[in-house]
Image (tube, rainbow, N blue to C red):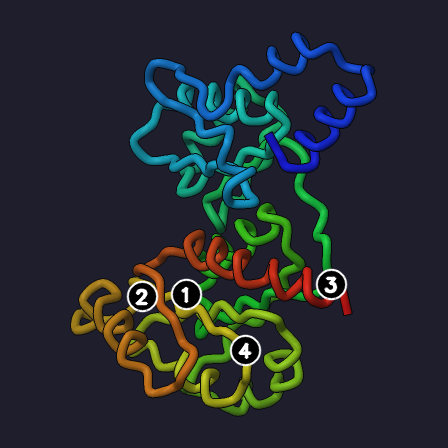
Amino acid sequence: MTRDRLAEMLAQVQQGVLPVEHALERLKQLPFEDLGFARIDHHRTLRKGFPEVIWGPGKTSQQIATIASRLVENGQPALITRLDEKKAQEVQTSLPALVYYPEARIGALGEQPTPKTSLSILVVAAGTADIPVAEEAVISAEWLGNTVERLYDVGVAGLHRLFDNLDRLRAASVLIVVAGMEGALPSVIGGLVDRPIIAVPTSIGYGASFGGVAALLAMLNSCAAGVTVVNIDNGFGAAAAATLINRPNAEQADKS
């Protein structure tokens, strides 16, 4: 149940177009719907501005299909993260309309929200190997209702590639910076722009990177002010945080 859909329904009740008992029938699944194996939080859009997102691992394809279809039937898009290709194909047998993004490992069902502002989130990836995590952030942010741009393969081993895109870095409302290895890129960008930066460490790197722990610690110890950090490989978490930052900026821009 989205805020706009609820407001429209209440207006119909007020105008006498929609009987009260029909409105109550539509609201009966709030705040959650108990499916036995899952309790779907249909109220989350009203609280957070975006619906519950489905975590793919650990669920059967049928469970995923059921949850996704119930979200869409209640007027919300369904986003499934960390969905492998085999399971995505199984879900598509039940839900042919499911769109699958293989590089991001994301499945999506329903109507993608239209961005309400031109203010953009810029997703920056240090290396080509970091792109899968960056794509998880991109697709998630788009389905959470943002305008999103990409800037890939601009890591610290060749800073001239980054400096060639300073205008793009400074034009973004929020930046998501994805990097593995030593995880230095968010600090570099943090010293160049006056925008919020969400750093995403990836598990890319040789043995001493400890599966992304080295990049995580480097980002947490960044000397650049304004850099915040999410967990290793957590592109979705970065997208959710960027959405919450971008929304007030967008509302302020619309008023000015």
Which residue is at a point 54% across and 44% down the rendered structure image? 101
Query: Of label 4 and label 2, which has the lower sequence position?
Result: 4
Asked if 124 appears above or below 140 in the picture, the reply is: below
Does residue 90 appear in the picture of this structure?
no
Counting labels gives 4
Which residue is at a point 61% across and 88% down the rendered structure image? 164
- Residue type for callout 1: Ala
Q: Disc 1 designates what residue?
A: 129
In the figure, residue 60 lies in which quadrant? top left
Q: Disc 4 designates what residue?
A: 195
Q: Nearer the viewer, mark 4 or mark 1?
A: 4
Q: Quadrant of the C terminus?
A: bottom right
Q: Disc 3 designates what residue?
A: 118
Asked if 251 appears above or below 185 in the picture, the reply is: above
In the figure, residue 73 lies in which quadrant? top right
CA separation, marks 2 and 1? 7 Å
Which residue is at a point 51% across and 26% down the rendered structure image? 68
- Residue type for callout 4: Arg
Q: Nearer the viewer, mark 1 or mark 3?
A: 3
CA separation, marks 1 and 3? 29 Å
Which disc number belongs to residue 204? 2
- Residue 37 position within the rendered picture, expressed as x and y whole percent measured from the top left: 33, 18
CA separation, marks 4 and 2? 26 Å
CA separation, marks 4 and 3? 16 Å
Q: Residues within 10 Å of mark 4 (few under 14, many from 20)?
A: some
Query: Of label 4 and label 3, which has the lower sequence position?
Result: 3
- Considering the numbered disc 2 on the image, is that residue within a helix, a strand or a loop? loop
- Considering the numbered disc 1 on the image, is that residue within a helix, a strand or a loop? helix
- Considering the numbered disc 4 on the image, is that residue within a helix, a strand or a loop? loop
Q: Nearer the viewer, mark 2 or mark 3?
A: 3
- Residue 215 position within the rendered picture, expressed as x and y whole percent measured from the top left: 28, 73
